[in-house]
Each structure stands twice: as C-alpha cells, then as structure tokens.
Image (cartoon, rainbow, N blue to C red):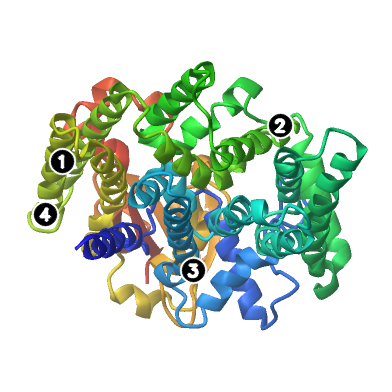
Amino acid sequence: MKTLWTVGAALLLAAAYLFNLGSLYAPTNGDEMVYLHIARLTSESGHWLPLVSDLQTPMGSEMRNTKPPLLFWQAMFAGQWSWDLFTLRLPYVLETLLCAGLVWLFVRREKVGDPLLAAALYLGFFATYRYGRPVLSSSIESLFLFAVCALVIVKMPLCKPSPTRLAAICGLLMIPALLSKSFVLAAPVGLWLFLSLWVLSDAKPGLQKFWQSAWPAAVAVVIGVVGFALWFVLDPNPAAVWREFIVGENFSTKFSDGRSDSIPAFWLSPLVNAGLLFPLVIGIAIAALQAMRDKTFQASISEKLLWLWLFCWMLVFTLPSQRSSRYIIPVMPAVAVLLTVYADRIHRAWWLLTLALIAIATAALGWAAHSLDSVFPVGLGYSPFYFVAVGALLLVCVIGFLSARFRLILTAASAVAWLALLGALATPFDRDLGRFDARVTQVVAGQKVMVPQNFNAQFERFQFALPMVPRVQPLPYMVSEAISPVSLLQQAPFAIIIRPLGIPKPAENARSYSIIAARLVLRGRQNPNEVTWERITDAKALAHLLVEREVLIGTKN
C-alpha cells in the first residue's frame, strides 16, 4: 500500500511540472527566448557547433556563445521531433524530475527522514519550478552536482584510504554540469570535496592531511574542467568561445560593477529560491543554531557535509562583484534534504506560517483568475475546474493547519499545487482568443512581420505564436519607441501592434491599414508605477493591468 501511495504521489508531482509546459506564459527566465533563438539557428545550420545567432550585445559583439553548448543541444535534440515549446522544454523538466528522484533516493538510503517529503519540498521551491522547466534551465547542473554531493556522502566513508577512483567519478559527473552552465561551477565543488575529505580524514592536521584532502579534490576538478575544455576542441572557432564566453560572460561580467545583489542580500538567496517555503528555511536555520547549543546533540556526517555543501557555494559566489540567487540553485536539493532532516525540529509556527502564505497566495490566484475571466466571452475563459482547484487547495491548507499528523507533507504538496495553479493561470491565453486564427497562416506564411518586443529576443516567441511553414520572418521593434502603425508597415508588409484593452478599435474608414486578426495576451512586464493597491483590488483595473491585445495589421489593398 505504501508503494502505491509513493508511486501515485510521484505521478502527481510529475504531472504538476508537466502541466501547461508548452505555454508561452510559463514562469521562466526572461532570457529563455535568446537561447531558443540560438538553438533554432544552430539547428537550421545543420551543425551542432559552432553556435549560431544574429543577436548582438549592447556592446555590439555577437550574442552567441552565451552558455556552453550542452544547454542548447538538449533543445536541438528534442526539436528533431517537433519545434514547439512543450517538446523543447521536455528534456529540462525531466532532468528536474530525475533530481527530485535522486533527492528521494538519497533520503531513503541515508534514513534521514521521509523521502517523499524531501522530493516534494524540492519541487515546491519556486526556483525549481521557474528554472527547472524552461530551456534556460538550471536542471542539469542541479542533477549532476547533487549527484556528486550524494555520491561522496554515501561512498566516501567507505573509500577513505584511497578515494581517487571516487574523485574521478565525481569529475566525470561534473562534466555535463560544466558543459551546460560554466567551468566556474568546479570551484565550489572542488572546495567542498577538499573540506569534506579533511573532515572525514582521521589523520592529524598537517601537510599529509592537506595532501590527502587536496589531491582527490584536484583530480575531480581537473577531470571536470578538461571535459569542459572539449568545447574548444570541438568548436571550429575556439577564439570566439574564448572571447564571448570565457572573457565576455565570465571574467568581464562576474567582476564588473554592474547590477548585483549585495552580500547580505545574496546570503538570503536560499530564502528567495524557496519561494513560498521560505519560512521553513528560516525555521531550519533557527533549529540548526539551537542544535549547535545543545551539547548532547551530535549531527551525523551526512548532515555536516550537506551544511558544508551549502556553505561552500555561498562562500565561492560571494567573492565576485556580480551576485545572484540563481548561482546557488544547485544547492537547493541539499536544502530540501536538510529541511527533511530537521522537519520534526522546525517549530510548528514556521509550518503554520508557510501554510498561511500558501493559502493567501492561492486566494490571490483565485482573485486574479476571477478578474481575468471578465475579458473573455462566457465559456471561453477559465474552466470552473480552476476555481474548484483553488477551493480544494484552500481546504488542504486548512486541513494542514488542523492536523499535525499530515501538516508536513500537506505543506510541501500545497506548495507544488500552488505552482501548478500559477502555471494554469495562463491556460485561457493559450487557446481560442489567445491565438491568431487559421486565416493568419495563409496570409503571413514566410512573410516579414514587424513584431513588438520589450526584452532580449522576445521576437522569437512569434515562432511559436505563428507556427507555420515556411516560417514567418519576425523583425523586432521596441514597444517603448511608440512607432506608428503606418511607419511599421513601411518596413514590412505586416506588423503586430499592441493595444491596451481600454482603447477601442478605430473605425475602418479612419485607418490607413487593414486589421487581419487579434488576440489577447498576458503582459510580460509592468511599469512599477502601474502596480498599485487600488488596481490590484479592482477586478477591471487588474485585468487591464495584466492583459492587452496584439493586433496583426497589413497594408490596405
């Protein structure tokens, strides 16, 4: 019976992450379209390397080798079946689910708590959902680097006399992570391996102990970095890789004075990445401090090394002048394990506060859906099941409040369910009135179309909004430039313009262009001055804040 429960729960967790995966409005990093653009052009080139792009950085250099090739190759491989968002994102979300499975397996192997709770907590982190599903993902490094962490914790005590083979395996596991994100990730892993071996060594402090700890760590780092260096061997233009990635994306940015988190803000990154589960991260920190003061309490080796893993990542990424909570996403599987280890020692107030936050956030989703539903004709907006799901999640939160027995697992499950409801909020905009109709395919196939964008490479989304053969040729213009429709149509035979909901459509005889089709879209970015309490609490004003129309226009015949 327990096995059936575990399998059923795992399928529900996986379904939550797969649901609405193909949405244009899925919570992602804003730069995802940059990476989809590079992946598409590289795929169309017929070669895996070099990476291809026609984008440029603000400095005028090519925006091409922005990440190592493995990040793009996954999308290119999946795209052999179909070039749609669900298919392209599928490898990345499967890696996230594998990482959750590894968390489950590690907790079960070490017997440090409820494995299902650990996996659900990991999937309940907002950073896992946001950066574990899109093409611009942290899933592969989270999976393979946590595999390094788990392998060392499980096997190192058995290999203390001669850990070189284990270190070599760790180096091999590092290669996919480094080839998908950066060689820099070898630094925190190498530091952790050195300190872990130091902690586990029975030798007295001295040169011998230092060498016994440093040598295996160095072996792992060297193997990982050599694997990363294969990029230079395989790429026909290694000089461009050095210039654009090593110098441009790493040294010139990580140590520049650009926008970055302060050191105190950066050390709060685990809270930011946890999303609605952040009170539990506060609770675990307090519980750990209380345990340290208790002289009778003895932390296990597993627990010590997990804390050390977190500390090494925080320390290494504090050093550059550019800091971001995204840099420590690979430690979140370990945070989920630590939350499970301390689950019974975290004060119940933190669990109750977390449930309260999830309940408030759920009510907010219900209010947003109610407000947005008003922009659709009856029957074409939100399904009644969405509002039933909102009510059911609120009921689950209440049960968690009242039942201490089920509080922990219901908190984790509620966090995952809330993320699924957040993704489902875009569902009406992915069908019917949120799409251009079939007539558009015949009209604009293979044509040049001026399209709006307010962020890097947002024109690439029209490859998915206007899927057709031959492909549409989107030409971007900045929304902030407020170019008139007539001026846009002087540059291309078709254009897509933005119209707020409150602005009526001009009369036919008052226009110098023809309206071909229109669709409702969710606004991706709001001006901070627009977001006020009065607008959020007014259903009509909130709908106008979140929704606008994209209108496809063409020259009059």
Q: Residue at x 22, y 56 (%)?
A: 428
- Whichever of callouts 4 and 1 sits on the residue coming sooner in the sequence is 4
How far is mark 2 from mark 1, CA to CA?
44 Å
Element under label 3? helix
Label 4: few (<14), some (14–19) or many (≥20) C-alpha neighbours in 10 Å: few
Residue located beneath label 2 in the image: 258
Q: As rendered, which of 273 and 427 lies closer to the eye?
A: 273
- Whichever of callouts 4 and 3 sits on the residue coming sooner in the sequence is 3
Residue located beneath label 1 in the image: 396
> Residue 379, image x and y in percent?
8, 58
Residue located beneath label 3 in the image: 91
How far is mark 1 from mark 3, CA to CA?
31 Å
How far is mark 3 from mark 2, CA to CA?
33 Å
Check disc 4 and give the amino acid type. Answer: Phe
Q: Residue at x 45, y 64 (%)?
A: 462
Check disc 2 and give the amino acid type. Answer: Gly
Q: Is residue 479 visible?
A: yes
Check disc 1 and give the amino acid type. Answer: Val
Element under label 1? helix
Label 2: few (<14), some (14–19) or many (≥20) C-alpha neighbours in 10 Å: few
Residue located beneath label 4 in the image: 385
**With 213 as the anchor, is 345 left or right in this view?**
left
Q: As rendered, which of 125 and 148 lies closer to the eye?
A: 148
**Res. 517 image quadrant:** bottom left
Q: As rendered, which of 280 and 391 lies closer to the eye?
A: 280
